[in-house]
């Protein structure tokens, strides 16, 4: 574990909106409850937070890619100099020495973090327009989504402390064929194939993803996401 990060709710650059995306690393152990890191906050609790989005993870290994892709964006250069650019709670470098990213992490993976905390991979992140504002890059959310470098969320199975330097141990992998990248790709590529959707719906999905894929199966069409990515 490279860093543990917390943030407070702040006013958004867009009138009438609030954000908790501005998170910074903290020293020492941070307690983790069933709804997230103690001391962390979300600006929109309808979309963010809750037991299925208790902890947001973003791989530190993605940062070099974004530094190269956004090398002419001075704001991005500043943000990407340290963990926290993407509003993550946990900045992670590797799982037992291996690369840890969306292709290596699977839905339902269970981790022990540190001595006792147990976390479970619950879903991938669907990036929103607040990343565009944060990076001063109008297509930043779309870039994350299309590149499948969006990060993912964890639910908390056993509360406990986490801190920078903690070891992460994979305890269980019930769905090795369903990486987070594969699921994110189905969303981004607007997959509507009934066989694939039925297979996905047999997984232990969070309610929001179950509704998304069920609507696609029922209608044969993909949902619109322009408002999520581009903003109000």
Image: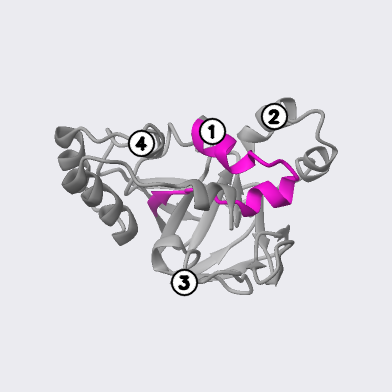
How crowded is the residue under tag 1: few (<14 C-alpha within 10 Å), some, or many (20+)? few
- Circle 4: element type: loop
Query: Where is residue 70 shown, x and y percent of the image?
Result: 74, 31
Give, as a single range, the part of the protein colored magenta: 121-146
* Pointer 4 with pointer 1, Cβ within 8 A: no
Q: Name the mark nearer the viewer: 1 or 2.
A: 2
Q: CA distance from mark 1 to mark 3?
A: 28 Å
| Residue at which label 2 appears | 64
Q: Name the mark nearer the viewer: 4 or 1.
A: 4
- Circle 3: element type: loop
Query: Where is residue 151 shown, x and y percent of the image?
Result: 52, 44
Q: Residue at x 47, y 49 (%)?
A: 125
Q: CA distance from mark 4 to mark 1?
A: 19 Å
Q: Name the mark nearer the viewer: 1 or 3.
A: 3
Q: Quadrant of the C terminus?
A: bottom right
Depicted 23 relative to depicted 31: above or below: above
Q: CA distance from mark 2 to mark 4?
A: 22 Å
The disc, 4 or 1, on the residue closer to the chain's N-terminal end is: 1
**Residue 35, label in figure:** 3
Q: Is residue 46 left or right of residue 205?
A: right
| Residue at which label 1 appears | 97
Residue 114 visible to an observer of this rendering: no
| Residue at which label 4 appears | 179
The disc, 4 or 3, on the residue closer to the chain's N-terminal end is: 3
């Amino acid at each position: 574990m490279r860093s543990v990060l917390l943030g407070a709710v702040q006013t958004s650059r867009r009138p009438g909106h609030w954000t908790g995306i501005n998170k910074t690393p903290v020293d020492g152990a941070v307690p983790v409850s069933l709804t997230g890191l103690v001391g962390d906050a979300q600006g929109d609790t309808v979309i963010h937070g809750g037991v299925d989005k208790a902890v947001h993870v973003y791989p530190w290994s993605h940062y070099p890619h974004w530094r190269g892709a956004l090398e002419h964006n001075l704001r991005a250069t500043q943000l990407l100099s340290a963990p926290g650019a993407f509003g993550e709670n946990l900045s992670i470098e590797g799982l037992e020495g291996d690369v840890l990213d969306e292709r290596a992490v699977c839905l339902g993976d269970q981790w022990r973090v540190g001595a006792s905390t147990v976390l479970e991979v619950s879903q991938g992140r669907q990036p929103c327009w607040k990343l565009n504002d944060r990076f001063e890059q109008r297509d930043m959310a779309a870039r994350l989504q299309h590149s499948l470098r969006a990060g993912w969320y964890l639910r908390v199975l056993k509360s406990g402390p986490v801190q920078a330097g903690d070891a992460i141990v994979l305890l269980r992998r019930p769905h090795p064929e369903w990486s987070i990248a594969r699921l994110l790709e189905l969303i981004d590529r607007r997959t509507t194939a009934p066989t694939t959707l039925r297979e996905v719906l047999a997984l232990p999905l969070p309610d929001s993803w179950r509704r998304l894929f069920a609507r696609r199966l029922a209608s044969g069409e993909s949902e619109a996401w322009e408002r999520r990515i581009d903003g109000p």
